Image (tube, rainbow, N blue to C red):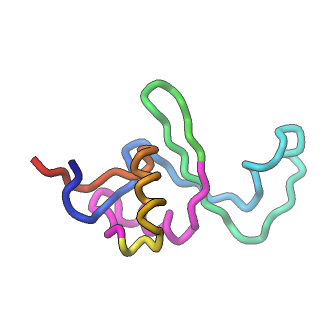
Amino acid sequence: EAKGARVALASGVETIEVEHDVLGTPAKRLRRLKSHGEPRCLVVARAEDGEVDVMELPREIAAQLTRAGERGVRRDALGLDAHAIEELLAARILVPVAYAL
């Protein structure tokens, strides 16, 4: 059971900044994408079974989580509603920093 209000990126989760809509583009068009002009942040989570989940997070939230490392960030400081945070926890993108014993 989670203890406290801090969350962090799960082990193995990486953030990648891109300037193109790579998630919404067919593979045959990837070489000719035009830049959005503003970077977007993708979060890549690799599961133990080899599955990979990719999702977009607001750039400032991804940067905040990356900078915080294992010490994590207070849930209320992320600027996401409780439902979004619970979904990120369920997807194992985020993990609680501390657990009750």
Q: How many marks?
A: 0
Report the residue at 57% width, 60% height from top: 57
Q: Nearer the viewer, residue 28 or 101?
A: 101
Report the residue at 86% width, 60% height from top: 34
Query: Residue 68 placed where, x, y %?
Result: 35, 65
Main secondary structure along the magenta-highlighted residues: helix
Question: Does residue 32 appear left or right of residue 96 in this picture?
Answer: right
Check if residue 81 falls in the magenta segment. Answer: no
Q: Nearer the viewer, residue 80 or 19?
A: 80
Check if residue 64 falls in the magenta segment. Answer: yes
Q: Quadrant of residue 74?
A: bottom left
Question: Does residue 16 appear left or right of residue 23 in this picture?
Answer: left
Tell me if residue 88 comes above or below residue 65 in the rendering: above
Query: Residue 46 placed where, x, y %?
Result: 49, 36
Segment tinted magenta in the rendering: 55-75
Question: Does residue 99 appear left or right of residue 93 in this picture?
Answer: left
Q: Nearer the viewer, residue 66 or 92?
A: 92
Report the residue at 84% width, 41% height from top: 26
Question: Does residue 28 appear left or right of residue 15 in this picture?
Answer: right
Tell me if residue 58 comes above or below residue 48 in the rendering: below
Q: Quadrant of residue 6?
A: bottom left
